[in-house]
Each structure stands twice: as C-alpha cells, then as structure tokens.
Image (spheres, rainbow, N blue to C red):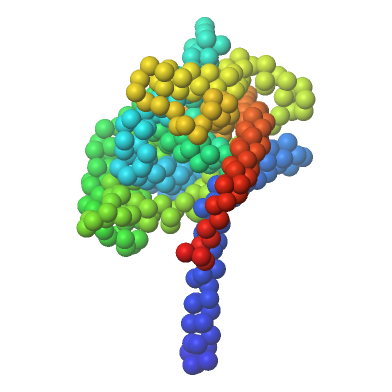
Amino acid sequence: MSDGTSRHVRVFSRASWPEVERVREILRKETVGGALLLVGAVLALVWANSPWAESYAALREIELGPAALHLDLPLHAWAADGLLAIFFFVAGLELKREFVAGDLRDPRRAAVPVAAAVGGVLTPALIFTVTNLGDASALRGWAVPTATDIAFALAVLAVIGHNLPSALRTFLLTLAVVDDLIAIVIIAVFYTQQLSVLPLLLALIPLALFGFLVQRRVRSWWLLLPLAAVTWALVHASGVHATVAGVLLAFTVPVIRRYGEGPGLAEHFERRFRPISAAVVVPVFAFFAAGVTLGGLDGLRTSLSDRVALGIMGGLVLGKVVGITLATFLVSRFTRAELDDDLSWLDVIGLALLGGIGFTVSLLIGELAFDGTAHAESTKVAILAGSVLAALLATAVLMARNREHRRICAAEEVDSDADGIPDVHENDR
C-alpha cells in the first residue's frame, strides 16, 4: 500500500470513530429506541395487511441455522429466542447495576417503586384470570398483560416530560427494571414446557468461564462471545427460554471497579450493547412479532371481542393503573417508605398508565402462551391496542402535569429574580 493510501486510511479511521460514537450516543437515547420499535411494528402491520401478506408470512418462516445442533430455526424464532437474549443481557446489566450501585441498593428508597412493580404485575394477571375463568387454554396467557416495555415507556416520557421532575423518570425506570426481573422469572418458571437437565447443567460450564473472565476484567470479544453463544445454545437446548441465558450472563459482570469506586465492566458492556439492542434487536423482534392480519374492521372487531383480548387490554390499561397506584399508596401510607416529595398522585397515575405499555415482553409472552393457537392473532391485536391506548392516556395526563410543573418552575424563577439573587452561570464560576 502506498504512503498516500496509508495516510488516507489513517485519516479516515481517525475521522470515522467520532462519527461512530455519535451514532451510538443517538441510539442510546430512549426516544430513538422507541421510534425504531414503532417503525418495526408499523412496517409489519402494513405488510401483513397488504396484498403481499403471504410474502411476509413466508419471510417469518425462513429457516436458518445448523440442523445438527437443532438450531435450524425460522426467522421469527431467531428474533424471539436469539436477538431478545441480547435485549435481556442489557436489561440484566441494568438490573445488576441498580441492585449493586443504583436506587435498588437502598431498600427504603427502592421500596415504593418495587412495590408498585409487584402491584403492576399482580393486578393485571388477576383481571385477565377473572375475565377468562372457565377457559383453560385461555388462562395460559395470564402473564401477557403483566409486562411493561421499558424502552417504549421511557421514550414516551422523554418526549412529553421535559418539565416533569427527575424523580418521575427514576420511579419509572426502577419500576420497569423490577418488572423485567419478574417477567424473566415468569418466563423461566411458567413457560418452560420440557426441561432437559443435562444441557442446563452443561450451560453452567461456559457460564462459569464467562463469569471468571469478566471478573478478571477481560474484555476480549473473541473469548467472551463464543462462551456467551455456547451458554445460549445449551440453555435453548434445555427447554428453558433462551433469553434467560442473557440475564444469567449479565449477572456475572462486575458493576464496581476492582480498586476503588467507579463504573465497572457492566457499564462498559451496557454502553456497547444498548445501541445494538435499540437499533437492531427490539425493532427486528417487533417486525417479526407484530405482523398480525387484522382482516379489516370486521376482523379487528372480532379480535378485540375475544375474551383473551379483553383480558389483555383490561390488564394493561386498567390493571396497571390500579395495581401500581394502589401498591404505591399502601406502601407509602403504612410503612416507613415515602413517595418522593416532588411527585404528586397525578404524577403517579400518569406513570402507572405508562406502565400499561407492554409491547416487547408482552408480545414475547403471548407467543410463548398462544403460538399456533386460535388466540395468537387476537393476543397481538390486544397488546398493540392496549399499549397504544395506555400511551395516549398517559400522554394526556402527563402533558397536563408537564404544563403545571413548567408554571411552577417559571414562578420559582420569578421569585428568585425578585429576591435580587443573581443567576450564576458556568462561565462566572
């Protein structure tokens, strides 16, 4: 290679890394992740209800992977079992970071949002169960309305909540993180159909090696990625949903640096993989999971009249609000835990409505519960409709609260100016 060409490559390389990092920063933003998720879902809905719907169905069923390892899976299964393992790896990193160094480290501080998350799981499950009593096949979907989509909910809050107190986002993030943990347990315990013990035990070997290396602060992808892939494949072979492997791998990653305080490998991996999760994993899963054929207004009406659909929508829109708000009230009223002073009960209700956005994990649980059954299509329609309705109601409540908080901030600024206290700018310090 000539010197001129070498200089050109070096200059291009130096110039390209800042651009790559800027793209990563954009993809880490909740609004961008939520927008890409919606794009994937809308594209699937449009294609599945177009004259080319058969090609969408055929695309979902294209099989890839080595048959010798029983990994010749259709694309929609790769999206749900494979790609979502990355999503749950990122969620697991966030979970561990919250438990070790975040808001969940202090039980008293975490008690209110943790209780709210539990209430937001139990009440929707109860509403779904009551709605579908007497139908054993329908009751398999009791967990569908229990999940909160952390990416979608935070994206809505980021768009409408510029003047809302930061405590609201912290509450929602903690609630959604705990909700994810409960969802992982539900998937592992209630949606494992056949358990093969030997592959599950064998998965502990690459998992332990992965944990040993990350505890030694090894970051070499050529060592870690093969171990992670083998762990995932063995968990998949065991019958336990393979996304659990992502969480187990994440829990082995250290949060705190070995010497002194500060961010550890968990934050490094989270920053690396969150853009992949936001830009690829969640939108691709939404694309393969949300493509339901509505059949026009009559088909939509039929789907939403199904008792399963009614239970899901009731759980997402009503159950989440009642469960989260009631649990928050009971814990703050009868224990030493207190609701943040910056939050009003209207803020909590708006936040509880956001909890009814159950998109990604609800679709996953719906596939596990009803794949190949008569309830599969109505489940997807109900999740989409319930999540959109919850988002719209939350937007209406929180936009009103946002205007109120903006007036309060403006009034405080006027009072500060009236006191004659000069504003301190960064350049004046």
Q: Can the viewer see residue 391?
A: no
On the rendered structure, is 198 left or right of 178? Answer: left
The residue at the point 31 percent across, 61 percent down is 219
Location of residue 201 by image quarter: top left
Of all residues, the one furthest to the top in this rendering is 134
Compared to 425, does 54 lie above or below?
above
What is the x, y in percent for residue 145?
Answer: 53, 24
- The picture places residue 197, in percent across and down from the top left corner, at 26, 32
The single residue placed furthest to the bottom in the displayed view is 3
Where residue 347 appears, as percent x and y from the top left, is: 56, 30
| Front residue of this view, candidates 63 and 1 | 1
Residue at 51% x, 31% y is 343
* Residue pictured at 50% horizontal, 87% vertical: 7
Q: Going 51% across and 53% down the picture, which residue do you hit?
A: 28
* Residue 178 visible in the displayed image: yes
Position in image of residue 338 (x %, y %): 40, 27
Taking depth in this image into account, of 315 and 212 the one nearest to the observer is 315
